[in-house]
Amino acid sequence: MISLDDIKHFDLRRLDPTKIDLTKVDLRKVDPRKVELPTVRLPELPTFELPSFDLPKFELPDTPELPVDRIAGFARDAAYVGVGAVVVTAQRADERRRELTDDVTTRVRKLIDAVA
């Protein structure tokens, strides 16, 4: 039987993973309240500062006025198409669910009749 002290002091460099048989491991015997996980201490990371610089400033050219009505109409049409796709998909999923329920019910009844 392996104790927790054996696990804590085990040298992982001696481990040959090809010889481990996990079929014999029974995790039901491990009490998770008594397992102590090792503490990992990371080395302190070095600190450094990035150089500061100013981004160049530039002016964007004037753009023509956008046709707001056309953009709003396009967004409205896209929303209608998206809602319609969701509704059709939900209807098809409900139809498939009903077909599957009917098929399973029919098979179960046939099985019950065959057994009885």
Image: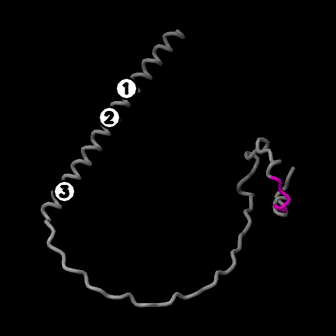
Label 3 packing within 10 angstroms: few (<14), some (14-19), many (20+):
few
For marks 3 and 1 on the same chain, the one whose residue lies earlier in the sequence: 3
Q: CA distance from mark 2 to mark 3?
A: 27 Å
| Percent of width and height locating residue 106 | 42, 18
Mark 3 element type: helix
Mark 1 element type: helix
Vertical order, 94 against 6 (above or below): above
| Amino acid tagged 1 | Glu
Position of residue 85 in the picture relative to residue 29 (left or right): left
| Amino acid tagged 2 | Arg
Position of residue 14 in the picture relative to residue 84 (left or right): right
Q: Which residue corresponds to mark 2?
A: 92
Which labelled disc corresponds to residue 74? 3
- Give the extent of the magenta segment: 10-16
The residue positioned 71% from the left and 54% from the top of the image is 32
Q: Which residue corresponds to mark 1?
A: 99
| Amino acid tagged 3 | Phe
Mark 2 element type: helix
The residue positioned 47% from the left and 13% from the top of the image is 110
